[in-house]
Image (spheres, rainbow, N blue to C red):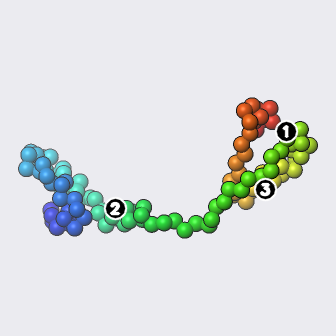
């Protein structure tokens, strides 16, 4: 086992208790360490630090709707929702307690 690889990636601690192991356990540990792709793990870790540059998502409020008016315009808003789903957009609606049940949503 080339310990310089462990040093390169700051993983020397993997062998800290090595001398206390029996021969079978030593071999198992070394075999496991040799299967580790430290470069891949390091790259994956570095990628967690990168800022994702996705399109800007905005949450914009809609005007308040009285429930009686909502019933009149139900189909209109249902079509807006279906269109957003087809386009892969996310829509969130907040309703006063119980409204979701009464509107079957």
Residue 19 horizontal side relative to residue 104, left or right: left
* Element under disc 3: helix
**Does 7 appear above or below 72?**
below
**What is the distance, in whole Å, between disc 3 and disc 2 at their CAs?**
41 Å
**What is the distance, in whole Å, between disc 3 and disc 1 at their CAs?**
22 Å
* Element under disc 2: helix
Is residue 82 shown to the viewer in this render? no
Marked residue nearer the N-terminal end (3 or 1): 1
For the residue pair 82 and 48, the one nearer the viewer reads as 48
- What residue is shown with label 1? 67
* Element under disc 1: helix
What is the x, y in percent for residue 72? Answer: 92, 43
Q: Which residue appears at 48% of the width and 66% of the height?
A: 51
Marked residue nearer the N-terminal end (2 or 1): 2
**Does 100 appear above or below 73?**
above
Locate the N terminus and report the quarter of the image it occupies.
bottom left
Marked residue nearer the N-terminal end (3 or 2): 2
- 2 or 1: mark nearer the eye: 1
Residue 77 horizontal side relative to residue 57, left or right: right
Q: Which residue appears at 73% of the width and 53% of the height?
A: 61
For the residue pair 68 and 41, the one nearer the viewer reads as 68
Q: Label 2: few (<14), some or many (≥20) within 10 Å?
A: few
What is the x, y in percent for residue 101? Answer: 76, 32
- 3 or 1: mark nearer the eye: 1
Q: Which residue appears at 62% of the width and 67% of the height?
A: 55
- What residue is shown with label 3? 83
- What residue is shown with label 2? 41
């Amino acid at each position: 086992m080339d310990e310089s690889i462990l040093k390169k990636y700051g993983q020397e601690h993997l062998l800290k208790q090595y001398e206390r192991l029996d021969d079978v356990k030593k071999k198992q540990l070394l075999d496991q360490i040799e299967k580790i792709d430290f470069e891949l793990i390091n790259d994956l870790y570095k990628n967690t630090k990168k800022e994702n540059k996705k399109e800007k998502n905005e949450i914009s409020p809609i005007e308040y709707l009285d429930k009686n008016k909502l019933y009149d315009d139900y189909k209109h808003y249902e079509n807006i929702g279906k269109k957003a789903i087809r386009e892969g957009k996310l829509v969130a609606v907040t309703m006063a307690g119980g409204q979701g049940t009464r509107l079957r949503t």
